[in-house]
Amino acid sequence: MKKILSFALCTILLSTSLLAQEKTEETKKKPQIDMSNRPNDHFLLQFGYAGWAGKPDSINTSGLSKSFNAYFMFDFPFKTNPKLSMAFGPGIATDHILFSKTNVGIKDNTPTFYFTDQSDTNHFKKTKLATAYLEAPIEFRFSADPLNGKGIKTAIGVKVGTLINAHTRNTKYSNSSNSVINDYTMKEASKRFFNKTRISGMARIGYGHFSLYGSYQFTTLLKDGSGPEVRPFSIGLTLSGL
């Protein structure tokens, strides 16, 4: 009886050992997901509508103000879940705000940045205020199909930027009746009234290479006490690839 029990015990132990060894070998042979050729959405090109939150009614913006952004991002997938990743990289972001019959005093020798309504006197028919920032966005990304770059994609993050240019472009000097007096263009540039650093929040959602984006600037466009406390925002389309 003892011999039978001993034999049975040895058989159980041997079987357990063989099963454990087999599982270990299966684990070692489990194929790893090759992420080397994964589409990383390195390039982001954005085109959208730009506006100012908190803009007073006295500022006469008009037409379709636009935003153009371009970024080169480095994407790092999570080892535990390749559908998730973090991305960051440099880029350029520009806003082009349009005004009607308004003097945008970007170079006025005053302590305050004035937007003066000139509809009852001589004025430039079209005025554009353009700003450009060198930015560094940081995104937390989700991709439903990371190996092929298809499927639903979402991203949320922040952007930190520094102002590199601010200028106005004025065209078609006209009288109060809106008749052109002199068809010429005047450009003025100055960063004196603007915050040099801006911090924005952003989010994207889409499918494949196309997504809708939205961004909102947490910091004010102008320095404290230099003008209205407006905060730029934009919404539009993102094209991503590579």
Image (spheres, helix red, strand yellow):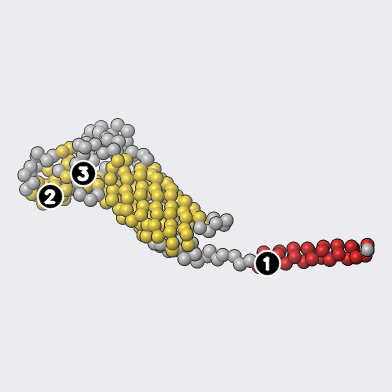
State the CA–CA distance, disc 3 to disc 2.
17 Å
Q: Residues within 10 Å of mark 3 (few under 14, many from 20)?
A: some
Q: Quick check: marks 3 and 2 in contact, CB under 8 Å?
A: no
Q: Earlier in the sequence, mark 3 or mark 2?
A: 3
Residue 220 is situated, as x and y percent measured from the top left of the image, at 33, 38
Query: What amino acid is labelled 3 in the image?
Result: Thr
Q: Residues within 10 Å of mark 2 (few under 14, many from 20)?
A: some
Residue 18 is situated, as x and y percent measured from the top left of the image, at 77, 66
Question: Closer to the camera: disc 3 or disc 2?
Answer: 3
Determine the residue positioned at 50% across, 58% down.
83
Dot 2 lies on which element? Answer: strand
Q: Quadrant of the N terminus?
A: bottom right
Q: Which residue is mark 3?
A: 61
State the CA–CA distance, disc 1 to disc 2.
76 Å
Residue 65 is situated, as x and y percent measured from the top left of the image, at 24, 49
Q: Which residue is mark 2?
A: 172
Determine the residue positioned at 6% across, 44% down.
177
Q: Earlier in the sequence, mark 1 or mark 2?
A: 1
Query: What amino acid is labelled 2 in the image?
Result: Lys
